Image: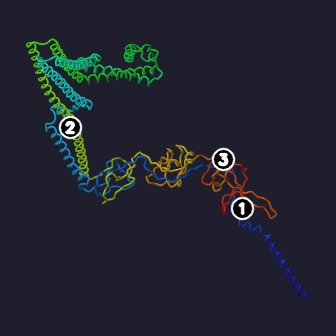
Amino acid sequence: MNEKTTKRREWVKNAAIIFLSVMLVLTFFSNTIMNYSLPEVATQYVQSGSITAKIRGTGTVEASDPYNMIINDTRVIESVAVKAGDDVEKGDTIFVLENKESEELKAAREELITLETALDNAILAYETKILDGTLSAGTIAGVQSGNIESASTAQARVQAAKDKVTNLENTKAGYEASLANLASQEALLENNSTYDAATKEAALNSANLQLRSAQAQLETASAQVDSVQAWFNENGVKTQAEANQKVLDAQTAMDLAKMLMDNAKAKLDGDPNGSFTAVVGEPGNPDYDSYMQLKAMFDGLEGLTWQNIYDLKKAAYDNEVLKHKAAENIAKNFAAKQRDLSSAQAAKASAEQQVASCNATIENLNAGTTSTDLAAQKKSIADQKAQLNAAIAKTDTEITVAKAEQTQILTDVAGELNLDSQNAEIARAREKVNEKKEQITKLEEEQNNPVVTAPVSGKITSLSYAAGETTKPGENAAVIQVAGKGFSLSISVTNEQAKKVSPGDVAELQNSWYYNDMQITLTAIKPDTSNPSQNKLLVFDVTGEDVTAGQSLSISVGQKSANYDLIVPNSAIREDKNGKFILIVESKSSPLGNRYFATRVDVEALASDDTQTAISGALYGYEYVITTATKPVEAGKQVRLTD
């Protein structure tokens, strides 16, 4: 029993010793174990110093103003007389072409045949239209002389022809109405001897009704005559010549008003606040002579500025324009008004005859008639009927002629437009034929001279073809850097970088020892078309003996060096949605030693180069800044330092 108890106690004691030993070891090494699980960071002191803000980039040298040689037809290259980099003089041989007819020349000759056929067809259609007998001689002569009337004039001619037919038809209708009245009167006279009281009263009523109708027609015709006469009186014209003269007078007045307005505008543009008297000068001065005409129309001109004068002159010109348009309308409508007057006068005369006849019939019915009087009245009516029938026959003839004229005018107007269009088509076809002939002549000249020479002196920068290859029309066959012209180089940078440089800055060339006396100068800062909102294009002028197009050069350009109090490595700069910041290391004491934590410090980048950035922020200048880490590091988290 005692032996078992003793063994149990020894086992418990040994277990307690082992447990305590393990706990002591873990406590002793806990700091070391934890350190191995933390991100390991590299740090560097924040320091002061100088920074040169440089922009670096690589670009390809291009000729500033290269001459692109183009062979305009498809030809086979027989031989190439130069190679890229050779200097050539104007007239030196570049390519020798095989002496074979080009495909372009063959195609041009075939196209010429097609164009000449089209021209012949256009001329034939034009001549056929002239000879088909549908157009008047005057229209044909006008087209051939190039005297094509305007659309408004043609429209006026068509309307006038239409109005003429309408007026003649109205005149005929008046004659026919008069003839019907005479027939009624004649019937009354035939039955006059047998009238009883009731019949006589009915005849009188009928005659009075015809009289009132005739008087109404007379009043309407008289009003129409008075209206047209009033139009002539109001517009002050009696003949077409007078109307045309009014247009010429209005044109002269309008031209003068425009000249004075333009003069005033020129003076206004030169001296907006200048006064009339200060500029016009003495009598004899052209301005004085011109504006004295204006002075006669406006009082107090001497006190006005040129702006006032221009406003008055423009108003005067606008008024003259209205007068000119009114005069044109008068002249345009004169012929129609003359026809209206003739028709109204004819209708009035016819109505007067009807009134007279009706009055005579009523008088006879009231007084009774003798056989002699009755015979005289019948003869008078018969004579009037004969006159009216003759007038109707004449009017029918005039209507037929007017309709034929209307048809001819419509035909002439349409034909004139058609011929004018055909003339234009012939001119275009002839121009195309001439252009094609010129092209063929040029191609034949090139065909007869298979040697392609340098059009300018300079250096061959590239050749697109070798012997045996076929040229492509419109593509560069060779590029010549013209003698005396420079080279350029471009690099794309951010908008922020572009703010650090300005035209005139001299760029440094990497491996400059390799090149002989090469100078690179910034000449322009332009938007980068590939990303205009974010990038700029720095354009440099490149000079030197060893410069050739196609070279790839690496350069740097930027401001001069400047001193800053706080400088950190570029790798220390971090950025998130709140802006740029750095992480510094701060230490805290513990029973097991110092522990290190990352702390965020917001900063502003002032300048940078390839390795360092100058910053401003809440720093003293001796902090450790984290540059790299084995794991992602967050502000407030514990880290361990590299050994």
Q: Which residue position is annotated with label 2? A: 419
Name the N-terminal-most of marks 2 and 1: 2
Tag shown at residue 639: 1
Q: CA distance from mark 3 to mark 1?
A: 32 Å
Q: Which one is nearer the viewer's eye here, 399 or 246?
A: 399
Please say whether residue 275 is visible from this viewpoint: yes
In the rendered view of the protein, which quadrant contains the N terminus? bottom right
Please say whether residue 239 is visible from this viewpoint: no
Q: As displayed, is residue 563 above or below residue 351?
A: below
Element assignment for label 3:
strand
Query: Which is in the foreground here, disc 2 or disc 3?
Result: 2
Q: Which residue position is annotated with label 3? A: 563
Name the N-terminal-most of marks 3 and 1: 3
Q: CA distance from mark 2 to mark 3?
A: 86 Å
| Residue type at numbered disc 1 | Val
Residue at x-position 69% and y-position 48%: 617
| Residue type at numbered disc 3 | Asn
Residue at x-position 84% and y-position 77%: 16
Which picture quadrant has residue 197?
top left
Left or right placement of residue 32 versus residue 117 in this view: right
